[in-house]
Image (spheres, helix red, strand yellow):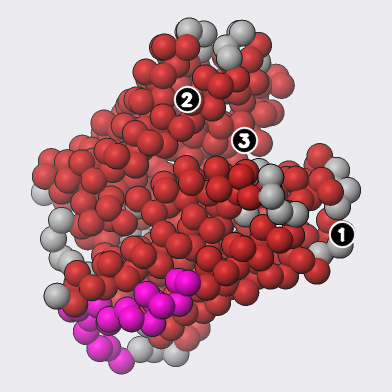
Amino acid sequence: MSRVRGFFCIFSADLLVRVAYQMGKTPLLPIFAATLGATDLFLGLIVSVSTVTGMVLKPFIGIFSDRWGRRSWLLIGTTFFAVMPFAYRFVQTPGQLLFVRIVHGLATAIYGPVTLAYVVELSRHRRAERLAWFGLPRSAGYVAGPIVAGWLLLLLEPATVFTVIGVVSSLAFLPILLLPPPPYKEKRSLPPLVRHTFSAFYAGSRTLAVWLAGGVEAALYVALYAVKAFLPIHALTLGVNVAMVGTFFGLQEGTHMLLNPLGGRMGDRFGYRCTIGLGMVVVGITLLLLTLTGRSFMLMGLAFLMGVAQALVLPSTVALVSTRIEEQYLGAGMGLIGTLRNAGKVVGPTGAGLLIRWLEFTVTFRLLGVILLLGTAFAWLFISQQQKTRR
């Protein structure tokens, strides 16, 4: 019963803060930054800086939650989610906005590894499926957040919308306060903080599953964010209706959200590495096919495939690490994956932008597709060889 209650509470809290946080990103944040006079370059920095915050801090937050407990850090994260939106009302310059975004980014840096570690600790079985269900709030945030923010902007000033975001985020305190301690948690005597931190990083760095899962997620997000950044421009040059471009991303995220539990169940049933490999092959093929069509109905099919690939890969990467890393370093493992994931989100648009400037869209995306397919094949062969060597 405590497991059901724990999952319901963490699911509810994550849903509230994720939807609210995405309300504050698109289209609200660029519009608000523009009203303050932010240049294009500085606006890009403002939008991406919270991702960099998470990339640096997630492993440390994971280690601290291993040491001092998940619930206390979730309360701290909820405080950042609830309090920081009210600070936007006092922002008057782009520089001040950049600082507020850095501090606000601490909220997701905390919630990312700590919530995943908590969900993993709720059950020793069917972890990928449980993680897949837990992934629904994040997908719901991507879908609902921009829509709600867009409608609110018709009625309210941008700073007032941020105040609404703070009020919504504050509701997450209730499920977090009702959160029971995870079952199966064994009490251990812990070494001093510095030694514990070094031990956690050492344990993560020598766990092959951490590098495999983190590398896969980084590669996947390089592809996804490159598509988000440059497919709209490419599609419009081919004469594709702008509404169809928006539908592409809505269908992709909707497919991911609906099929995520099925992808998790497949990972539990057929093996995490198998499901991850299949999903990455689908992504590679999809990137290649994106360069071969400008027809709307074919783009919708590719959006569906991209969503399927996400559903296959993402639940199984975290589940794979949770079964390989030592239990006392679980939060650290989730944090290391988060760092690699955020690195992919940063590198995707910037790296693809540099390649497109040099090679143009078609060659760049074909190259990305081939690299993903070859990388997946190499990883599969490497892991198979490692298993033979151990035997």
Element marked by disc 1: loop
Q: Position of residue 333 (x, y in %)?
A: 37, 63
Residue 99 seen anywhere in this rendered image of the structure = no
Pointer 3 and pointer 1: residues touching (CB < 8 Å)?
Answer: no
Residue found 50% across the figure and 83% down from its top: 194
Residue found 52% across the figure and 8% down from its top: 294
Considering only order in the chain, which callout, 3 or 2, is on the residue closer to the N terminus? 2
* Label 3 packing within 10 angstroms: few (<14), some (14-19), many (20+): many
* Label 2 packing within 10 angstroms: few (<14), some (14-19), many (20+): many
Viewer-side residue, 78 vs 289: 78
Q: Does residue 203 appear left or right of residue 323 in this picture?
A: right
Q: Does residue 366 appear left or right of residue 316 in this picture?
A: right
Q: Which region shows up in magenta? A: 171-189
Residue found 19% across the figure and 72% down from its top: 3
Q: Does residue 49 appear left or right of residue 141 in this picture?
A: right
What amino acid is at disc 3? Pro
Counting labels gives 3
Residue found 61% across the figure and 8% down from its top: 239
What amino acid is at disc 1? Thr
Q: Which residue is mark 2?
A: 248
Q: What is the quadrant of residue 113 in the picture? A: bottom left
Residue 377 seen anywhere in this rendered image of the structure = yes
The quarter of the rendered structure image containing the N terminus is bottom left
Q: Position of residue 119 (x, y in %)?
A: 29, 66
* Image disc number at residue 93: 1
* Image disc number at residue 349: 3
**Residue depth check, mark 3 versus mark 1: number of the one nearer the observer:** 1
Q: Position of residue 252 (x, y in %)?
A: 41, 31
* Label 1 packing within 10 angstroms: few (<14), some (14-19), many (20+): few
